[in-house]
Amino acid sequence: MEKRLAACRTRRRGYMSMRNELPAGWTPPVHEKPQEACDFLKSVLTENRLMGRLTPSDRDHLVSAFQLQTFVAGTKIINQGAQGDCFFVLDSGAADISIEGRGSVLTATKGVAFGELALLHNAPRAATVTAETDVCAWALDEVTFKLILMGKAQQDTQDYARFLANVPILQHCMERGDLPEEQVMELARCLREVEYAAGRVIIAEGDEGNHFFIIRDGEVKCTQGPDQKVVCKPLTRGDFFGELALLSSDKRAATVTAVQPTTVLMVSRIEFTRLLGSLSDLIVSTASQYRAK
């Protein structure tokens, strides 16, 4: 585990060290496309190991920046050893992915993404991609790819830190001097933003507790038992939940469901314990008092 964490930190430092500077006046390009195409690209990016960790808003910027390109059968979409300038998502047709000395390694079809690693690492293309049939592919230019994928990390941290400073319980801890600003920034860097549709269960009663949640937008309800009895007032922006299971070995004490489209910021058990463990008594007492109103 320690080796994996160290590797992740090394990769993160590598990404940030080659971060592009934001050109003056630059804004992400917007290429109009049907809603069906937007939904398709969002689903591909969400499942992508690299881009699945982006915030929903960042993925929306990427989706808007994709532009449809066509390639006739036999065209080399990318060449092994060449410098990368685009990231592709195949929309229709089939393409052969081959590596020199190994031959064909994969036939890419609708939904297959390729070309991101060369852009991310400023490295030559690792394979050749050739259109086996006429192909339509969504292409994202290198500048937009890098600036959104790597350049937004710092901005997101600042945004999250400002939001956290206005979460009542954390604001109270900061005013008392129990939560230094540096610790808030560290917490902001650990947050992951997740969207839930109305009616979606965020945590279920009886489950293991591995995350702590803060509501950024939307509303949730907390229920218990097979009859789904409501156990507290609705929770909205700035409210939090999931702390009890992290502070003990107990299972989730209630089911929390999104009442409307809801965005939460979540932090893992390890980071919660490291950054907020010393405030556990205050968090628990404040939560019980506030939710009882």
Image (cartoon, rainbow, N blue to C red):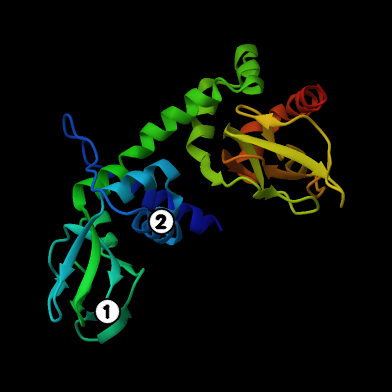
284 left or right of 149? right
Q: Is residue 182 visible?
A: no
For mark 2, what is the residue?
39
The quadrant in which the N terminus is found is: bottom right
Please tell me which residue lies in front, 185 or 2: 185
Residue 276 falls in which quadrant of the image? top right
Vertical placement of residue 103 versus 144, above or below:
below
Instruction: Tell me the amino acid under the disc marked 2.
Output: Asp
Neighbour class for label 1 at 10 Å: few (<14), some, many (≥20)? many
Instruction: Tell me the amino acid under the disc marked 1.
Output: Ala
Q: CA distance from mark 1 to mark 2?
A: 21 Å
For mark 1, what is the residue?
94
How far from the left and from the top, in percent, is residue 55?
44, 44
Residue 52 falls in which quadrant of the image? bottom left
Vertical placement of residue 139 versus 145, above or below:
below
197 left or right of 75? right
Query: For the point 51% across and 42% down, which residue is it?
Result: 193
Please tell me which residue lies in front, 85 or 291: 291
